[in-house]
Amino acid sequence: MRATLNALLLSRWAKPVVFALALVPLVWTVWLAWTGELGAEPILESVKQSGLWALRFLLIALALTPLRVFTGVAALARFRRMLGLFAFFYASVHLLTYVGLDQFFDWHAIGTEILKRPYITIGMGAFVILTALAATSTDGMVKRLGGKRWRALHRGVFLAGLGGCLHFLMLVKGWQTAPLVYGALCAGLLALRRWPLRLPNPRTVRTLAPKPQDG
Ligand code: HEM
C-alpha cells in the first residue's frame, strides 16, 4: 500500500494533477459568481471563500510533514512547496478581491480599515509573512539564505496560520465552530512539530522538522 502510494505520488502526472485540483476552488467560485449562484452578496462570498481556501491550503501544507513521517509515504514531501504556494495564491486572491471589488481601490478607506479593525491588521500581518515565505521558497533562495536561516524563517508559517485563524475568529459574530476547529488544527500541528511523538525509530522523530529541499 505504502509502496503503491509512493509510486503514484512520484509519477510524472502527480504534480500536474495536484496543481489542477488545487485550482478547482477558484474555478468553482468564479463559475458560481458568473452564473449568479454565489448568494445575495457575491463579492463578500468570494472574499470569504478565498480566505477559507488560503487557510485550508496552509493547514494541508503543514500537515504533510507529520503525515509523511507517520505513514512512511516519503513522496508526500514533493507537494509541500506547491501547496504552500497555493495558500499564498488564495491569500493573494482574497486580498485582491477585498481591495479591488469590495473597496474599489479606495486606499484611504483601506488604510483606515487596517488601523481601525484589528482583524484586518492581523490578516495583513499573516499575509506579509506568507509573502516572505513565498519569495524565499525557491531553491536559489534556500542556497542564498543557508539551511539554518531558511528553516528559522520558514517556521513563520505557523505564525501565519495562527494569524489566519485569529483573523477568522475575530471577524465572526459570537463563538462559532469553524474558526475554533481551524485554530485547534493549527495549534495541534504546531504542537506536533514542537513535541514530536516518540516513534519506534528515533530517526523518524527528527524528520518532523521541515527540510528546505522538500517539495
Ligand atoms: C491580506 C490581508 C487580509 C485582509 C484585508 C482580509 C480581509 C478579510 C475580510 C474583509 C473578510 C470578510 C469579513 C466579513 O465576513 O465581513 C475576511 C474573511 C476571512 N479571511 Fe481574510 N483578510 C486578509 C488575510 C487573510 C489571510 C492571510 C487568511 C488566511 C491565511 C485569511 C482568512 C480568512 C478567512 C478564513 C475568512 C472568513 C471566511 C468565512 O467567513 O467563512 N485572511 N478577510
Image (cartoon, rainbow, N blue to C red):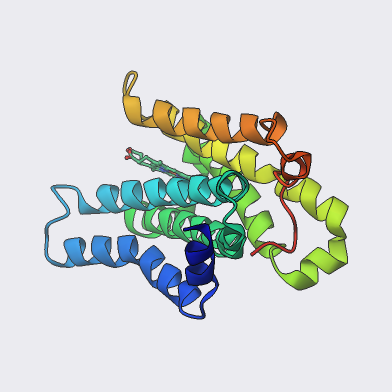
Marker count (numbered): 0
Pick the quarter of the image with the C terminus.
bottom right
At a point 26% along the width and 60% down the height, the residue shown is: 29
Q: Is residue 43 visible?
A: yes
Q: Is residue 117 visible?
A: no
Please tell me which residue lies in front, 179 or 214: 214
Q: Give coordinates of residue 118: x percent, y percent.
A: 51, 30
At a point 73% along the width and 39% down the height, the residue shown is: 205
Residue found at the far top of this picture? 174
Please tell me which residue lies in front, 14 or 188: 14
Q: Give coordinates of residue 198: x percent, y percent.
A: 70, 31
94 lies above or below 82: above
At a point 37% along the width and 57% down the height, the residue shown is: 97
54 lies above or below 193: below
Please tell me which residue lies in front, 169 or 21: 21
Q: Quadrant of ligand 1?
A: top left
Residue found at the far bottom of this picture? 12
Q: Give coordinates of residue 113: x percent, y percent.
A: 47, 39
Q: Give coordinates of residue 169: x percent, y percent.
A: 42, 28
As drawn, is 67 to the left or to the right of 20?
right
Please tell me which residue lies in front, 148 or 194: 194
Quarter holding residue 162: top right
As drawn, is 13 to the left or to the right of 36?
right
